Image (cartoon, rainbow, N blue to C red):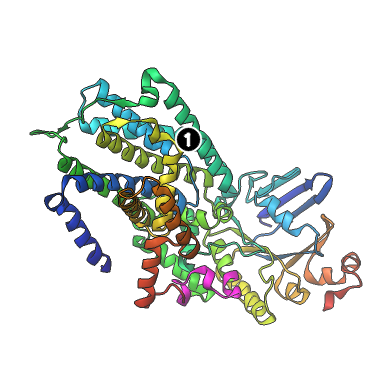
Amino acid sequence: MKRLAFILPAALGLLLFPKVSSTFYVLLLTEILIFALFALSFNLLFGYTGLLSFGHAAFFGLGGYTAALLSYYTHISLVPVLAISTLSAALGAGIIGFFCIRRDEIYFAMLTLGFGMMVFTVVHQWRSLTGGSDGITGFEIPKLNLVFAQISLFSPASFYYLTLITCSLLALTLWVITKSPFGLILKSMRENTERVAFIGINVKLYRWIAFIIAGTIAGFSGALFALYDRMASPTMVHWTMSAKPVLMTILGGPRIFLGPAVGAVIFYLLEHIITQYTQSWMIFLGAVLIPIVIFFPEGVMGTIVMWIKNITGRGTDG
Amino acid sequence: MAEPILVVENLSKSFGEFFAVKGVSLSIERGRITALIGPNGAGKTTFYNTITGKYKPTSGRVIFNGTDITGLAPYKIAKLGLCRSFQITNIFLDNTVEENILAALISYHNKGLAMFRDVYSYRKLLDEAHEILKLLGLEDKAKVKAKNLSYGDKRLVEIGIALACYPKMILLDEPTAGMTPAETDKMIQMIKALFEETGITFMLTEHDMKVVFSISHWIIVLHQGQLLAQGRPEEIRENPLVKEAYLGGSLDA
């Protein structure tokens, strides 16, 4: 219940944000929320299952390109666009995951990287469908069809609310999953894959399911991002996009559920502040990242939660 | 006599040219404690690994509780009720003691794919986990992370995980490995108590012969991957082949 003391003010702040802030920051926060969900989906594999994916952008991109293509060529409304985009990412995760989950550790990471590169190459080369390096632009955000009205999401505030509500619901779903029996089995696989098999768990099946869930949610965040950006471009599926959730998760902390989301906030704030002074902001990101990895391997959020636990005497030691 | 719970027929496991287990045939009766002994390198752990699915046998058959389990994946063998512990502690270190046990219970009760309900809302699973922790004397350490336990307690969690699979037969690979004499004594009393409490068929490897003779109803001796002898403790104690294998008969130690 102590959690509520943190969550309620945060939720209130997020809900009121567009009323008190300029459009620029509403747009920035929308992007942060999308990437927070992307990073949370990545962390279901990394922090919870112990699988480091270097190809998570493949599903982000699949969702994004599907949403862009549907918006460009058809006039279907928002809910089916998002649903079909998410499903296409789920299908992609099902196929790619089927192969990747057969290997552990660095081999898993390399397989996901390899598949990610393949998806990038296809997207980049298949000009007639994807527009090649130009990507897909010049479409409008599909309207949200409610029973009584059609709502345009053209204004930044309304798109912000769409993002806030859907990303919160999906983050909540992920959170519930991590607390479930399935989530405990994932955590156990992270700790000791071999032993999990000897208690009767089909490790490959569980990993595959986790991979599909993570890919599906990444696909949803990608679809939102393409609509937000009015564009699907090959950067969405590039390996540098796969690195983003990795960096965010390490910044925020992989062992705390909201760690990757906090990492997304830090990532964007750093980028935003530093690019006001210099274009080579990655140097500064590196300068922040290195001490975090060396001195605070639990990440910013993880370290703060640890301090709070120590102060309130709720240590994990017996 | 009831059919044996485990029948091993002409089982071999080779690594290249080397046979770690060679032509072993034996059967294990239900409701007994069987000790598997042999000098270092006799093939005891390979024998366990081959019947529990970690290795595929080179040849031979393994029948467990009437089912041919030869070469099945470990998770399928565990599901059939043949569970094991490991010589080198093999538990979920960053999870709590309770979570270590719960993971096995979730698997046993086929709740692993339940995704939308808090694991701590499953009253039955929690009660069973605490029952098992009570048997092991770990109930006050339920919320402690396994990595923060003493070595002896980690060994108990190791066994607790195997127990939480509700096995028909349990294989303990050197449950007292690396323990002090006092911890060894506690562990052996624990195994005896568990056997009496649950009636599970136990098979264990152990180096201390005094312990072996005091706890087991039946003893199997492996030597250089082959079955050297088997019989009741008093028969094994007098067996000249066994004495020779142990170099001058330190069996009375």
Question: Which residue is at a point 87% across and 71% down the rendered structure image?
Answer: B238
Extreme-front residue of the structure: A277
In the figure, is residue A271 to the left or right of A139? right
Residue B112 in sight here: no
Q: How many numbered circles does the render carry?
A: 1
Q: Position of residue B160 (x, y in %)?
A: 54, 66
Extreme-top residue of the structure: A128
Please tell me whether residue A185 belongs to the stretch shown in magenta: no
Note whether A136 is above or below A310 in the view shown.
Answer: above
- Which residue is nearer to you in this view: A270 or A15? A270
In the figure, is residue A148 to the left or right of B217? left
Residue B121 image-quadrant placement = bottom left
In which chain is the residue bearing label 1?
A
Extreme-left residue of the structure: A148
Note whether A269 is above or below A153 in the view shown.
Answer: below
| Quadrant holding the N terminus of chain A | bottom left
Residue A147 image-quadrant placement = top left
Q: Which residue is the site of mark 1?
A: A116
Which structural element holds mark 1? helix
Q: Mark 1 packing: few (<14 Cα in 10 Å), some, or many (20+)?
A: many
Question: Which residue is at a point 58% across and 66% down the rendered structure image?
Answer: B159
Which residue range is magenta in the image?
Answer: B139-155
Which amino acid type corresponds to the residue marked 1 in the rendered image? Answer: Gly
Please tell me whether residue B149 belongs to the stretch shown in magenta: yes
- Which residue is nearer to you in this view: A141 or B144? A141
Residue A115 in sight here: yes
Magenta part, dominant SS: helix
Residue B207 image-quadrant placement = bottom right
